[in-house]
Image (cartoon, coloured by chain):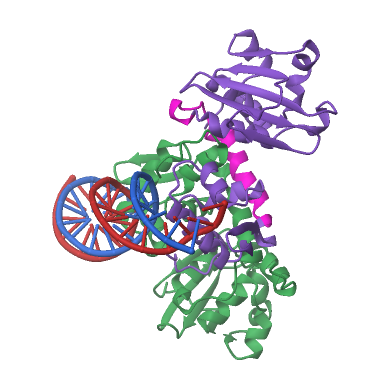
Chain colours: A green, B purple, C blue, D red
Amino acid sequence: MRSYGQYCPVAKAAEVLGDRWTVLLMREMGFGVDRFNELERCLPGISRSVLAQRLRHLERVGLVERLAADGNNVRYELTQAGRDLKPVIRSLGEWAAKWAFVDPDPLELDSDLLIRWMSRHVAHDQLPERRIVAEFSFATPRVKRYWLVLDRDEASVCMHDPGFDTDVSVMADTEALYCVYMGKRTLSSAIKDGLVTIHGPRALVRDFPRWFSWSDFAPTVREAAGTKTRA
Amino acid sequence: MRSYGQYCPVAKAAEVLGDRWTVLLMREMGFGVDRFNELERCLPGISRSVLAQRLRHLERVGLVERLAADGNNVRYELTQAGRDLKPVIRSLGEWAAKWAFVDPDPLELDSDLLIRWMSRHVAHDQLPERRIVAEFSFATPRVKRYWLVLDRDEASVCMHDPGFDTDVSVMADTEALYCVYMGKRTLSSAIKDGLVTIHGPRALVRDFPRWFSWSDFAPTVREAAGTKTRA
DNA sequence: CGGTATCCCCCGCGATACTG
DNA sequence: CAGTATCGCGGGGGATACCG
């Protein structure tokens, strides 16, 4: 971003972070996404050239470190300056969750993203001791299936059947599950309305709601839903 | 700014604030600048069309309210949502003051801005009871003079001699006074180095350093000057 | 996987002039 | 003071192809 020509920290921050995609890229890296192609997948719509340009820029200004283990095995890590930005970006999100946030636009109902985001917010300590495979099916905006493989240490997303037996099967309306994730409604209300259905052994179905901690911003979204004052 | 197509508060905040100038505009309004032409002067380089477009946008998304007292007497005020953004923008600046901030670029030495900024950070309770007129002279990058009229309630900047008697006369190297303002150096060190000279009655010259509270970010800049670790 | 190279369009935005 | 109107360019960035 072109300089503002001001010796002011706010202006400097705006120059470093003001380019399109940069804040979202930092958000993703703050969640530990560290590979070029994975970053691309987490930012639908970004072009590969822009992603490369942003990563170079962030490296140049000292927010990101490029770690080339060997040849084509590259990882990107936040520096301390980059990690230090995490609470700032969070406060941006908290602000938006409180004021600028209404309902999901139909165009925003990307089930790929939702599944990725859910996989980042697994309450691992609430899971059974053994590995759990949860299958998710969405009908809208297009039919999609995913498998979440969860254990006490890790959560991974599969776009194809991983081969393991499925423990729990979830059918969800994409918008409804997005709203649950974001704190706009409760999972139980979505289930009552028939927008989310969970199949599987009784004990697992009972515990399922506790396996996810949902969005970091959900508490703020819930709070904002109460106080509707905008002026 | 084009949508990111993500139902995520961080993405929404980036859409609302991501356009060029928007964050700086909100910074200015947070300081109470509320007139179109004054905003233009506080954002050197912004074009009038972009300023108008940004104000309309911010009004549309509910951060700014346009108050037309009558005809051409218009003021812009932050809504509660806009005021709520102030600490967020501040945290952006704090981050930059800590990590992304080195020395003023020669092109950033705009004495107009410096005087305006200083006038916002007057420690009114440290002033004498009576009105004080301080004259500032800069030699670089071009010869410029200003008068700061200070009292217990108010501070105003004059680009021309206001007619009142001058109480204190300050001659300053622009870069040095910028650095003092931003916390990169102390006023006394700048005086010692002959980069700032204060003339006037002994008592006023003695008290002058306490009349200004300097930049909000100065403490962070000072702190960062100690710890040079960047990785 | 981890990028680069190219192409090209569009529009953001700065400059200037003009109006009520 | 508070804008609108117009113009013109520069480059941001999306799409696609290609490479080691």
Q: Quadrant of the N terminus of chain B?
A: bottom left
Say above or below: A109 vs B12. below
Classify residue B57 as left or right of residue B163. Answer: left
Q: Is residue B107 magenta?
A: yes
Q: Is residue A8 something that shows in the picture? A: yes
Identify the residue at horizontal 43%, vertical 29% (top origin). Answer: B107
The image quarter in which residue A214 lies:
bottom right
Say above or below: A192 vs A11. below
Classify residue A51 as left or right of residue B37. Answer: left
Q: Closer to the camera, A219 or B157?
A: B157
Q: Is residue B217 something that shows in the picture? A: no
Say above or below: B208 vs A107. above
Residue B77 spot, x, y in % from top left: 65, 57
Residue A220 spot, x, y in % from top left: 69, 65
The image quarter in which residue B158 lies:
top right
Image: magenta residue range = B83-108
Residue B133 spot, x, y in % from top left: 71, 26
Residue B103 spot, x, y in % from top left: 51, 26
Identify the residue at horizontal 42%, vertical 72% (top origin). Answer: A162
